[in-house]
Image (cartoon, rainbow, N blue to C red):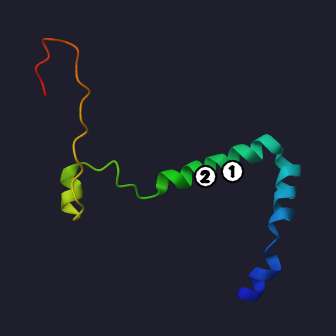
């Protein structure tokens, strides 16, 4: 199987040149950026988890973000 793959595989420069000739520069750039965005979104990010889920999987809880002091005199929240 490895020998068959090495016979079929193209060097990266040749493959990019062929794609550039067939589809054009902007379509190729857009496809590469879309692929990068898709890969970025598929990674496991823990920043978006709330404290309940973080506690369930054994991670430390995140501190609540501090609010900016309000200039409204009727706003008594700390």
CA separation, marks 2 and 1? Answer: 6 Å
* The quarter of the displayed image where residue 59 is located: bottom left
* The quarter of the displayed image where residue 25 is located: top right
Q: Mark 1 packing: few (<14 Cα in 10 Å), some, or many (20+)?
A: few
Quarter of the image with the N terminus in it: bottom right
| 46 and 35: which is toward the camera | 46
**34 is higher (above) or lower (below) than 76:** below
* The quarter of the displayed image where residue 29 is located: top right
Q: Mark 2 packing: few (<14 Cα in 10 Å), some, or many (20+)?
A: few
Residue 67's tag is none
**19 is higher (above) or lower (below) than 77:** below
Q: Is residue 54 left or right of residue 40?
A: left
Q: Position of residue 69 (x, y in %)?
A: 23, 24
Instruction: Return the residue at label 2.
Output: 36
Disc 2, SS: helix
| 61 and 37: which is toward the camera | 61
Please name the residue shown 80% across and 65% down the image: 12
Q: Are marks 2 and 1 in contact (CB under 8 Å)?
A: yes
Residue 32's tag is 1
Disc 1, SS: helix
Please name the residue shown 85% across and 50% down the image: 20
Q: Position of residue 72 (x, y in %)?
A: 20, 12
| 13 and 69: which is toward the camera | 69
Q: Is residue 34 left or right of residue 4?
A: left
Please name the residue shown 49% across and 51% down the image: 41
| Mark count | 2
């Amino acid at each position: 199987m490895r020998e068959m793959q090495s016979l079929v595989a193209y060097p990266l420069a040749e493959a990019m040149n062929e794609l550039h000739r067939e589809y054009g520069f902007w379509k190729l750039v857009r496809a590469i950026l879309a692929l990068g965005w898709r890969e970025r979104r598929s990674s496991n990010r823990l920043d978006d988890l709330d404290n309940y889920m973080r506690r369930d999987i054994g991670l430390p809880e995140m501190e609540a973000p501090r609010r900016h002091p309000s200039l409204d005199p009727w706003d008594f929240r700390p």
